[in-house]
Amino acid sequence: MSGGIFATENLDLKACFMKKTGFFYLSLFVCSMIFMGCCWKTSRQNAQIGSASVLYGLQSHFSIPGPGFVFDVLADGRLIGVSGNGLFMETGLETRDFNDLGPLPGLKTGPYGPSFLKVSPDGTRFALGDGNGRIGIYNINSMASEWFAMPHFDAEWADNTLMVVSHGEFGEPGRLSFVPLAGEKRVPVTLIRNIGGAPAGIAFDSRGNLFTANGFKSSGPSGTGTVKYFPRNLWQSAMRSHSPLDFEAQGQVIVDILSGSSLGFDHRGNLHVGGSDAFGDGKDVNFAALITRGALDEAIRNNVAVDPTDAHAVHRFDPDKENATSRYILNFNPVTRELYFFSDNAVYVYRPGVIPVSGEFSSPAEPREPIAPRPVSPSRSPGTLRVMTYNVCGNFLADTRLDDTFARIFSHVAPDIFVFQEFTTTMASQLPGRLKALLGGTWYVFGGMGSGIYQTMIASRYPLVLTSRDTLPPSDIRGITAALVDLPGETFSRDLYLMGFHLQCCDSPEFKARRQRSADAAMAWIRDAKTAGGAISLPLQTPMILTGDFNFIGKAGPEITFTTGNIKDEAVFGPDVMPDWDDSHLKDLLPRDANTGKINTWPGSATDPDIRYDRFYYTDSVLPSVRGFVLNTLNFNEKQLAQAGLKKADTVFASDHLPVIMDVQFP
């Protein structure tokens, strides 16, 4: 994963919007991307009183002024936000129109824009995380700023002179640090350590009690979305003594729901929770939650966590009907008492007392016209097969707002075979029909092992046989999705064996070891396929293509195995193998952007992406004539876009990855 509101964190949820930058934990999520929280803004005058929840109903929605928008509430109730490096301010209370005030001095955001914007309790300053390892403190009137280095996911003002920031490196325990803002020095000091996963949102209630969560489980034992409560006297004592609290051993579990990456309170003390656990059991996705004040008080009083399935204690909201995997960021306006639900490019506005909180709160989505096929890419010579690998960040089919975007991309490229990563499992039954509507013909599909709500998916114009979801010995939790494509003999000289990968993301010793295990397993499987007997046997000289999102980062290791067949764990996977049929190495295709010559594929929001996650390896001894390209519509000029039937931002909006294509000319 991950726009700037989602922070640039190394999470395989991708954040789709914020995955894999290496600065901090977004993504995943995601694009694929865990989502950061927008702030609470509850003044002491609006003390959280009363034990009953406020009944909210959907009033309206509005579009954000730019991609990656992060926002908060000014003292007068207007919204202030940042998109890219630019500042936007609402023209008046509840107008939903924004003045573009131009670039903010000193701001240079990361690839997904800023991570958070938080207005101070007295309304005179705001803190801005640039998504690039720095935090700036701005004077709202003069826009003068001071910056300090600080990795960050979310942040919150404890008071006008103290800020608490969540941060961490992916694969390592997350933490919270406090940063004194009085005086001249900005030295972060750890406040809570040993979050058994990713950092998440931060919220203070009106009494100064602190709430935070495990945003994405790694070491645990707490799980994704475990929200904990730290009483004011406890965290303040830890701060004064510089003795950090232990998230796993201290604090009180309040609820386990979603990812807790967005936390805050409304004026009655109801706790709102956002985010998504897309790689969990599939239950904590596509809604946001409001934990009632009464349930919260009871949980604290009895030291018993709130039951997330209790409809009286936990109210669920899903206003975005066009996305089956929505991930919400929530924010509360104490002046208008509106609760904002941010999803994709829209903000849904709820007000108390409109209708009871019980079920769904938006009108059904308008019925959509069937998508008409668009002009396809230029014809290819007979005997050429086109394969596309694409991490779709869960968006294809699941988010109907992007139907036209994907239609333009797929119609332009016109692949014969797709290898999707992060394909939303519940959309599988719709896939053959959608591809037929776009590209014509009959489509055969095969889905790999589930990983939360996602799976790797092969879709082909030609029948798929010898299908398998993993190797023997097994690889990793996502398996290796493989099939023999049964190609018509009158057009193609041989069939094609295809292996689809979505390896574990991010730069930590544990995750690199998991990628290495998958590489070892793939080579052992190829050794088996090349020899008679065993779990799989291929006809001699059957071309093999290995493709997908390999997530290679850090020092080389697994990528060497994928080319050379040098197996690291021979005790489990057997001896090394020369993987090509002529006992040579596999070839790394190295497709390039035709307009820039660049080979990197992530993030898709950049004209010059940083990293090459998406790859093709193949047996070049039997596939001597191949070529490939990376599709990045940001690098098309207007004439190229018109000829291709594409729009400038198509690959930006579709996913955090770029599609990569391989053309194979069979001998």
Image: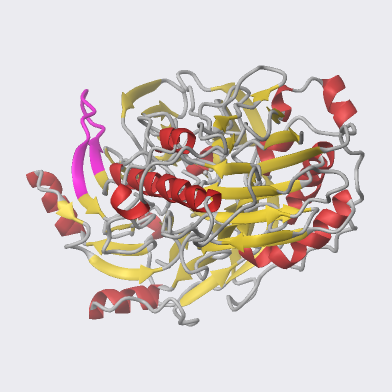
Residue at the left extreme of this rendering: 241
Q: Is residue 321 left or right of residue 500?
A: right
Q: Quadrant of residue 208?
A: bottom left
Q: Residue at x 10, y 43 (%)?
A: 242
Q: Quadrant of the C terminus?
A: top right
Whole-percent x, y for residue 549 in the image: 54, 42
* Range drawn in magenta: 177-192
Q: Is residue 505 left or right of residue 637?
A: left
Above/below status of 617 relative to 367: above
Q: Is residue 191 magenta?
A: yes
Above/below status of 112 relative to 270: above
Whole-percent x, y for residue 617 in the image: 57, 36
Q: Is residue 198 magenta?
A: no
Whole-percent x, y for residue 434 in the image: 81, 57
Give whichever of 435, 355 is nearer the camera. 435
**Residue 37 visible in the displayed image:** no
Give whichever of 186, 200 is nearer the camera. 200
Whole-percent x, y for residue 658 in the image: 64, 36
